[in-house]
Structure formats: structure tokens, C-alpha cells
Image (tube, grey):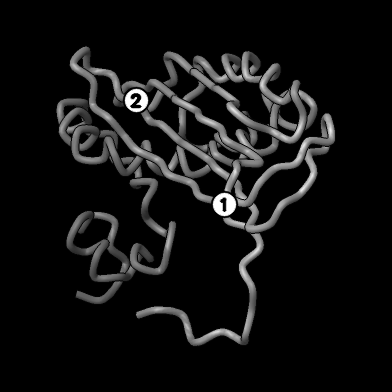
Amino acid sequence: MPLPAPAPRTLKHTRAVECKGYEREDGLWDIEGHLVDTKTYVHTRRDGGNERQPGEPVHHMWLRLTVDLDLKIHEVAAVTDSGPYATCGSITVNFKKLIGLTIGPGWRKAIKERVGGVLGCTHLVELLGPLGTTAFQATGRARESHNARKPVTGKKPYQISSCHIYKEDAPAVLERWPEFYTGKQ
């Protein structure tokens, strides 16, 4: 179902974010993000004063995280093809500081400590949020199979209470994790 009809309006800006997850032949996973910002009108670049035509990217950036099934980051590649300033892409090397982190609890805090603010790029840091969820989605079944071989810990799955579908007394919790279900049976 689409959104309700809007008031009359004119499109000025589009941000396109696409994230993909790839299983590699070596057992690792590549989680890639691509961010493109465009305007619908001619405007002047902040750096150099050249005109940027409608549809020409204001921001055009790529980010790849290579992770294992524990979602530990083994490699990072970041590229800025276009930004408002010629030197925007010079900070991409800092994203290597994410190597060794695990996507999970504390992820956003660790991002901020390593590449937040002047240590990174606002747009690439924003892209790390959807990349984290893409990593969970892309590797989900493989992680379930991988974790099934590990000793059972009795630890409550992270999904429980993460949204209304997985509240402790919801049918989905009864179906997936009956030992943690708190509703009436």
C-alpha cells in the first residue's frame, strides 16, 4: 500500500541507498553499500564553483565490509567518487579502523569512536547503519546453521523484544523460541 496522496510539490533532492550482501567462495561475506545524492536543478559546487547539472551526483560513495559468520569485520573498502569538496575522499582510509569490530551490540557506539565526526565522513558513517542490518539479513540463514553447531548457551536471542513482532509474548516468539515465550499457552 503506497503512502497517502501528497500535497502538490516539486522534487528537489534524491538520496539513493542500495545495500547488497554477497557470500564469497572463501567463507566470508561482502556487504556493500552505495549512496548517491542528486539534485533536480543546476547548482554550484561548494569547492571550485563549477556548475553541477541536474542528476549529477553531489555525493557518490561506496563502502564494503567483509565479515565472517560472527559478523566480525575482516576488511573494509571505502570510495568517494564525488563529494562537495575535492578532498572529501581523502578520509576513506580511516574506515579501515572498523576492522576487528563485530556488528552487533555496541556497533553504533564503536562506529562513532572510530570514524565519527572529524574522524570520518558523515555520509559513509550513515551508510554503516543499513550495512549492519544488511549483514544480518544476508547472513541470517548461514549464521543459524553455523550457530547450530555451537554449544547451546540458553542465552535469549537478540531478536526478542527488538520489535513488536518479537515481543516476548508474541506468536512469532512462541514459534521460533518457545523456551523464551512468556505468553499464555
* Mark 2 or 1, nearer chain start: 1
Q: Is residue 138 above or below residue 71?
A: below
Dot 1 alpha-carbon crowd within 10 angstroms: few under 14, some 14 to 19, many 20 or more: some
Query: Which residue corresponds to mark 1?
Result: 15
Q: Is residue 144 above or below residue 75?
A: below
Quadrant of the image containing the N terminus: bottom left
Secondary structure beneath disc 1?
strand
Q: Is residue 169 above or below residue 86?
A: below
Dot 2 alpha-carbon crowd within 10 angstroms: few under 14, some 14 to 19, many 20 or more: many
Report the residue at 56% width, 20% height from top. 98
- Residue 29: give its label: none
Question: Looking at the image, which is closer to me, 22 or 62?
Answer: 62
Report the residue at 60% width, 33% height from top. 124
**Residue 183 spot, x, y in % from top left:** 29, 72
Q: Quadrant of residue 89?
A: top right
Quadrant of the image containing the C terminus: bottom left
* Apparent side of residue 42 relative to residue 101 in the rendered image (left or right): right
Q: Quadrant of residue 12?
A: bottom right
Report the residue at 45% width, 25% height from top. 64
Secondary structure beneath disc 2?
strand
* Apparent side of residue 60 relative to residue 116 in the rendered image (left or right): left
**Residue 6 spot, x, y in % from top left:** 56, 84
The amino acid type found where label 1 is placed reads Arg
Query: Which residue corresponds to mark 2?
Result: 30
